[in-house]
Image (cartoon, rainbow, N blue to C red):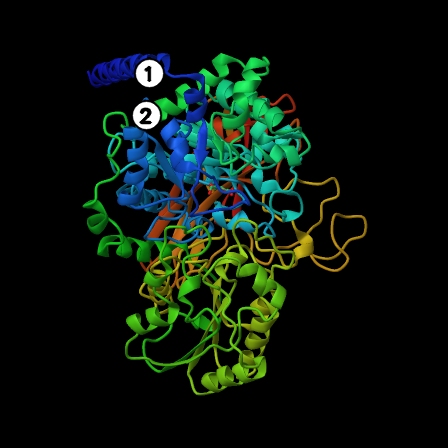
């Protein structure tokens, strides 16, 4: 009976979707039959009148172009009133009154800013991440927007690349789960309600694999690596129904993504069945000329032929497609298809019913940066922090006594939000020192800045490109500042040193060749360490950093990324034990920049190395071990967890059977705490080289002190699949090792055999 009802429900849903589609098609056919070629091409044009500018070009004559019907959408403006003004030009003054849609980089929250995405991913809490996107969608739609250029799901294995901060780290499975959650959070089931918006998965594809970690640099990789490791998160977003895709700046197989037909049509539309719209990245159409592919007309035609629908800022489509059509370089059908996909998105967003539906002046006061969104931001931020070291249980701190709070980021409001928080207002953010005072009002606080973020004039200048200056230079000498901090330390029971990167030392166009702490801050830490006082380092960072000295000499290290609007309160919650940290790294920390790329799911080599002593003619270095400083999946808690051996329900399996693998997890410490239990699988023998292990599942488990729980994973052949040499996704018979544990390097294992 239940099945019958379910089948009936599916049928009714299918029928109603089919009916809605038919209605939409009739509407769009009718509209398109009245559009001139210029108006159709106009829909393919996405412009920005300023706001968040990430290139050397800004759109000109925007109002006039809207009037003429030469603009499909706008990004970079916010606020119902401003957005309404632009919409009015389209709806009142253009010939066909086609509404515009309005986008923005809503990346980790909108006005209520959550931790940077790399931090969010370290929560391994999918529901929490979905909630952050849900809140961002509510705020952004209350602010006039209906399109978020997010989620950014680029896999990154190179921490020199500044945009590693914007993604979910190095693992394709976790990245895929997060991608789906973000799409659900932004769009809901369908984005019919006025507090949901269209998501845009980016940057399609492989943008995170830029050579040498230098932004916008070339990418070259084998198809097998692409399919196995880099493409899954984009595919996950497409499977989750993402409404739009943004093409990336880089080339793939020697053709820039924006003009790559294999990528945008064969793979995305034909293989994956994507039906939404594809937008270019900022001027990535015209940049194909710099890649050496020809003049603007040639590269614009290339992009349309490849399957690109919308041109962001380059105006290559607007200014050349009509001529290319005349010359037979593009077809009418290609222009019509692109135009249709943009109109469909607008239709689904309800803009033809009500072009002003996201411009309700009463919403901002009720829905933006409220007590509830701040509460959520505080909770979410605390979940993103990773405790890297905690010698002799320095943490959690007592809420009494004297605390020296030092470091250039302790009192720096402008560095709280992190990169890509374009709508965020840093003046609304809580600093670390404020958070400490809020959470521990009875403690005596002595503050000293101790050092500038950097004293390197070139780094300061290059970081401080946009106001306000994130690196504020104190004119006092380094010696004077350090002396003041050491005095503070000597007069305190414990030191909290808040150090790290300025917000814009990561993010777009913020690659670094040295990913250590700037010298000014390292000198401060060295001086503090000589005081003999326990030092707790609170680290702001948008990337893994080489913290070798720090890890050896500092008593405790709490990685807080960039925590967002409520970052200061959340940091204090964790420092004083109101929340027991549960974050785990989603990106490997190298010991040295020379080890990059260093990631957990690397391949076996023919000359593997045992990770102990140096061995001649093995895959190792003369001057350093192969080990990371902190491995993928690593993170401590104030409590401790013990894992039993792995139990498997069967050791020999056949065909489509499934396996239960389990461990007993026990909280062996004094605090209640959450542990991210991680499941990895090794394919022992295969027809192609496989990674040493791959993450295949995880669960976040809360246990009270002394409590034990059995944690089960069900494994099916689906988790054994990989891409073989013919790019066929399948599994092969043989031995597999099932690993379960606390991080990618510390695991318990059991061997099984599975035949087809
Ligand atoms: C970035 C994109 C962003 C776009 C619009 C580009 O520079 O690469 O991630 O969505 O600008 O702001």
In the drawing, does residue 220 fall left or right of residue 304? right
* Residue 396 makes an appearance in the image: no
Distance (Cα) linking label 1 and label 2: 9 Å
State the mark number for residue 98.
Answer: 2
In the picture, the quarter occupied by the N terminus is: top left
In the drawing, does residue 617 fall left or right of residue 386? right
User: Helix, strand or loop at disc 1?
Assistant: helix
Q: Quadrant of residue 725?
A: top right
Disc with the residue nearer the chain's start (1 vs 2): 1
Percent x, y of residue 219: 64, 37
* Residue 555 makes an appearance in the image: yes
Q: Residue at x 55, y 45 (%)?
A: 56
Q: Residue furthest right?
A: 616
Q: Residue at x 27, y 28 (%)?
A: 350
Q: Residues within 10 Å of mark 2 (few under 14, many from 20)?
A: many
In the picture, the quarter occupied by the C terminus is: top right
User: Helix, strand or loop at disc 2?
Assistant: loop
Placement of 30 over or under 638, stated as above or below: above
Residue under pointer 1:
31
Percent x, y of residue 573: 33, 65
């Amino acid at each position: 009976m239940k099945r019958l009802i379910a089948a009936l429900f599916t049928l009714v849903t299918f029928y109603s979707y089919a009916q809605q589609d038919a209605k939409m098609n009739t509407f769009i056919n009718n509209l398109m039959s009245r559009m001139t070629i210029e108006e159709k091409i106009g829909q393919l044009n996405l412009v920005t009148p300023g706001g968040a500018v990430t290139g050397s070009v800004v759109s000109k004559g925007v109002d006039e172009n809207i009037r003429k019907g030469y603009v499909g959408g706008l990004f970079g403006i916010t606020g119902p009133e401003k957005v309404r003004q632009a919409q009015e030009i389209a709806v009142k003054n253009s010939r066909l009154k086609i509404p515009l849609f309005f986008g923005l980089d809503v990346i980790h929250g909108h006005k209520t800013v959550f931790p940077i995405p790399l931090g969010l991913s370290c929560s391994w809490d999918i529901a929490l991440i979905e909630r952050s996107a849900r809140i961002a969608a509510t705020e952004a739609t209350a602010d006039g927007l209906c399109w978020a250029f997010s989620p950014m799901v680029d896999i990154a294995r190179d921490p020199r690349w500044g945009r590693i901060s914007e993604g979910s780290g190095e693992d394709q499975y976790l990245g895929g789960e997060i991608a789906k959650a973000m799409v659900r959070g932004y769009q809901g089931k369908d984005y019919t309600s006025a507090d949901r918006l269209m998501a845009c998965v980016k940057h399609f594809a492989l943008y995170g694999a830029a050579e040498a970690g230098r932004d916008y640099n070339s990418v070259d990789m084998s198809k097998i690596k692409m399919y196995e490791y880099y493409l899954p998160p984009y595919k996950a977003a497409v499977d989750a129904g993402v409404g739009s895709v943004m093409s990336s700046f880089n080339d793939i197989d020697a053709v820039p993504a924006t003009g790559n037909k294999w990528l945008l049509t064969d793979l995305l539309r034909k293989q994956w069945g994507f039906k939404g719209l594809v937008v270019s990245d900022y001027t990535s159409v015209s940049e194909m000329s710099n890649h050496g592919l020809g003049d603007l007309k040639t590269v614009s035609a290339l992009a349309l032929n490849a399957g690109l629908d919308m041109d962001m800022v380059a105006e290559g489509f607007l200014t050349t497609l009509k001529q290319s059509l005349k010359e037979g370089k593009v077809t009418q059908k290609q222009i019509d298809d692109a135009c249709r996909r943009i109109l469909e998105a607008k239709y689904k967003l309800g803009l033809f019913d009500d072009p002003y539906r996201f411009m309700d002046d009463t919403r901002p006061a009720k829905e933006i940066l409220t007590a509830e969104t701040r509460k959520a931001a505080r909770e979410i931020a605390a979940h993103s922090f990773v405790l890297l070291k905690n010698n002799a249980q320095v943490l959690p701190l007592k809420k009494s006594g004297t605390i020296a709070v030092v470091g250039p980021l302790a009192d720096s409001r402008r560095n709280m939000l992190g990169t890509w928080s374009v709508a965020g207002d840093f003046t609304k953010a809580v600093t670390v020192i404020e958070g400490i005072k809020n959470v521990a009002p009875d403690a005596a606080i002595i503050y000293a800045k101790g050092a500038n973020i950097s004293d390197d004039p070139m780094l300061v200048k290059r970081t401080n490109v946009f106001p306000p200056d994130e690196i504020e230079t104190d004119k006092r000498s380094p010696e004077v500042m350090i002396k003041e901090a050491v005095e503070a330390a000597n007069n305190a029971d414990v030191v909290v040193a808040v150090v790290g990167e300025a917000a814009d030392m990561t993010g777009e166009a913020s690659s670094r060749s040295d990913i250590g702490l700037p010298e000014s801050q390292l000198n401060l830490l060295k001086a503090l360490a000589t005081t003999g006082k326990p030092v707790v380092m609170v680290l702001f960072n948008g990337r893994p950093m080489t913290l070798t000295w720090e890890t050896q000499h500092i008593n405790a290290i709490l990685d807080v990324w960039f925590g967002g609007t409520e970052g200061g309160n959340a940091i204090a919650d964790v420092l004083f034990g109101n929340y027991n940290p549960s974050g785990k790294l989603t990106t490997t920390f190298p010991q040295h920049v020379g080890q990059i790329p260093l990631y957990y799911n690397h391949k076996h080599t023919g000359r593997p190395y045992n990770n102990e002593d140096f061995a001649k003619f093995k895959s190792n270095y003369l001057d350093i071990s192969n080990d990371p400083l902190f491995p993928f999946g690593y993170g401590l808690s104030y409590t401790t967890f013990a894992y039993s051996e792995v139990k498997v329900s069967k050791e020999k399996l056949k065909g489509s059977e499934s396996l239960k693998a389990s461990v007993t997890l026990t909280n062996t410490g004094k605090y209640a705490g959450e542990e991210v239990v991680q499941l990895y699988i090794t394919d022992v023998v295969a027809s192609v080289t496989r990674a040493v292990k791959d993450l295949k599942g995880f669960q976040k488990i809360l246990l009270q002190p002394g409590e034990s729980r059995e944690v089960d994973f069900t494994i099916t052949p689906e988790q054994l699949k990989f891409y073989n040499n013919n790019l066929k996704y399948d599994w092969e018979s043989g031995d597999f090792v099932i690993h379960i544990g606390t991080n990618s390097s510390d695991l318990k294992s059991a061997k099984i055999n599975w035949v087809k």
